[in-house]
Image (cartoon, helix red, strand yellow):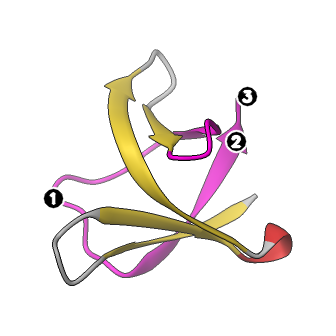
Amino acid sequence: MKVMLRRSSSGQLIAYVAKKDLEEEVVKQTVSDEGKVFTLANGWELEFSGLEEPLKLPQTFEAKRLQ
């Protein structure tokens, strides 16, 4: 699924999923075998592969929903 990542005015990482009209804060970031896993405030876990550091935001990335 396509997920747009951006920073809020307070510096918090925000994920927006257009197909679900969902915008949530990223509350946790972990590293998996496939890439990075971001846990959203609503409990969703999204896995991103191939993210560059540092992130250039706002930008849309392909993600896989784990939970």
Residue neighbourhood size for the residue with mark 1, other residues' Cα within 10 Å, grouped as few (<14), some (14–19), many (≥20): few
Residue 67's disc number: 3
| Residue 6 pos. (x, y %) | 37, 75
Identify the secondary structure beneath mark 1: loop
Of residues 9 and 3, the one drawn nearer to the viewer in this rendering:
9
Structural distance between the alpha carbons of marks 2 and 1: 21 Å
Structural distance between the alpha carbons of marks 3 and 2: 9 Å
Q: Quadrant of the N terminus?
A: bottom right
In this rendering, position of residue 62 left or right of residue 38: right
Residue 5's disc number: none
Question: Residue type at mark 3?
Answer: Gln
Residue at 16% across, 75% down = 10
Residue at 43% across, 45% down = 50
Structural distance between the alpha carbons of marks 3 and 1: 26 Å
Q: Residue under circle 1?
A: 54
Magenta stretch: includes residue 58: yes
Residue at 74% across, 77% down = 18
In this rendering, position of residue 25 left or right of residue 47: left
Question: Residue type at mark 1?
Answer: Pro
Callout in the foreground (3, 2): 3
Magenta stretch: includes residue 21: no
The quadrant holding residue 42 is: top right
Q: Residue under circle 2?
A: 64
Of residues 27 and 48, the one drawn nearer to the viewer in this rendering:
27
Q: Quadrant of the C terminus?
A: top right
Identify the secondary structure beneath mark 3: loop
16 is higher (above) or lower (below) than 38:
below
| Residue 49 pos. (x, y %) | 50, 40
Give the farthest residue toward the top: 33
| Residue 4 pos. (x, y %) | 54, 73
**Which region shows up in magenta?**
41-67
Question: Residue type at mark 2?
Answer: Lys
